[in-house]
Image: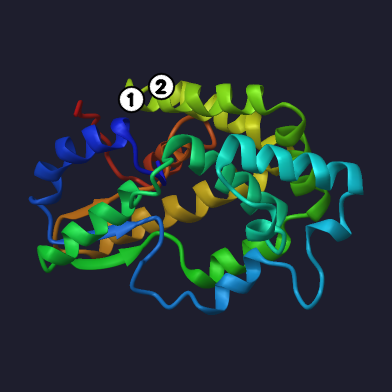
Amino acid sequence: MHTSNEATTKHYGNVLAYLERCGAYYGEIDFNEPREASESLFSFEDELDITHHINNKMVEKMKIILSKHFDLEFEQVRKLHPMYISALMAQKILSPNNDPPLDMLLFLQAMHQQMETGGLESVTFQEALAKSIPLDGQLRMLKGVVRNVGKFRKQIKNLEKAYASQDLKVIYHLSKKSMGALREKLIYQRNRQMANRVVSIVNENRISSFMCCGAAHFWGQYGMLSYIKKGGVKIEAVSI
C-alpha cells in the first residue's frame, strides 16, 4: 500500500529479510527520478480550480466534509485534480499522521544497503497516463465520496483489513469496484506495463532483484502475476 499504518508497518519488518538478499530494488516508481515537471499534472492550470467544475452547493459540502472528516482545508486541495483529492482523503483515513509510505521506507532501506534502484513505471509513462484520464470520471468519483463519506471510509478500512490478512483477491475486487470506469487505465493498463518491466528485469539482470508495487495489481486474469507467468517467469508464493 502507498501509505503507512499498523498493517504496512508489520509487513515492512517481515519483508526486510527478503530485501537484504537482493542487490537491486525496483519500486512502482523510481524515487531517484526527477518528478518536478510531473507535479503540474496533479493540478489545474492557470486560474482554474475544482470550483470551475462543481456547483456552489457541492463546494460548500466539500468544505465541511474535508474539515470535519479528513483534517483538510478546501484551500489546500482546490487546485488539485479530483482524483488526487480523493486519493488524499483515502490517505488521511489510512495514515492520519502522514508517516512515510511503505514503498518509500523500502526504498530508503535499499539506499542504505547501497542497492541498485529503479522503477517499474517511468515518470514519462505516468505523465501520459495522467493526461489520458477523463475529468468527468474523476469528478464522479470525488462527488461519490463527498456524498457518502461513511461508505468511502468503510471501503478504505476494508482494504486495510484485506491487506493486513494478505488477501490479494479481496484487495483486487475492492479496488476494481472503487475505480469504476477508470479501472482500465488505472489498473489493467498499468498491470501490463509493470509486468513487462518485471519480465525484462528478470531476463536481463544478473543479480537478485526485490520488486514491489501496489497490492491491487497482482490478482486476476488481467493482473501482473498472470502477465508475468505468460512472460515465461516462474512464480512461487511465499508467506510473510
The residue tagged with tag 1: helix, strand or loop?
helix
Asked if residue 155 is positioned above or below residue 200 in the image, the reply reads above
Give the camera-side residue of 66 and 128.
Answer: 66
Give the camera-side residue of 119 and 1.
Answer: 1
Q: Is residue 83 left or right of residue 194?
A: right
Asked if residue 233 is positioned above or below residue 42 in the image, the reply reads above
- Specify few, some or many for label 1: CA neighbours under 10 Å numbering under 14, 14-19, or 20 or more: some
Q: Is residue 111 left or right of residue 66?
A: left
What kind of residue is marked 1? Ala
* Circles 2, 1 touching at the beta carbon (< 8 Å): yes
How many marks the image carries: the answer is: 2
The residue tagged with tag 2: helix, strand or loop?
helix
> Which residue is label 2 attached to?
161
> What's the colour scheme?
rainbow
Q: Quadrant of the C terminus?
A: top left
Q: Examine the image and state in which quarter residue 104 appears.
A: bottom left
Q: Residue 83's spot in the image, x, y percent?
A: 67, 50
What kind of residue is marked 2? Lys
Q: Residue 71's spot in the image, x, y percent?
A: 55, 43
Give the camera-side residue of 72 and 94.
Answer: 72
Q: Is residue 232 left or right of residue 106?
A: right
Which numbered circle lies on residue 164?
Answer: 1
Q: Examine the image and state in which quarter residue 45 appears.
A: bottom right
Q: How far apart are marks 2 and 1 (CA)?
A: 5 Å
Q: Residue 223's spot in the image, x, y percent?
A: 49, 37
Can residue 183 be seen here? no
Q: In which quarter of the image is the N terminus?
A: top left
- Specify few, some or many for label 2: CA neighbours under 10 Å numbering under 14, 14-19, or 20 or more: some
Q: Examine the image and state in which quarter residue 108 appears.
A: bottom left
Q: Residue at x 78, y 64 (%)?
A: 49
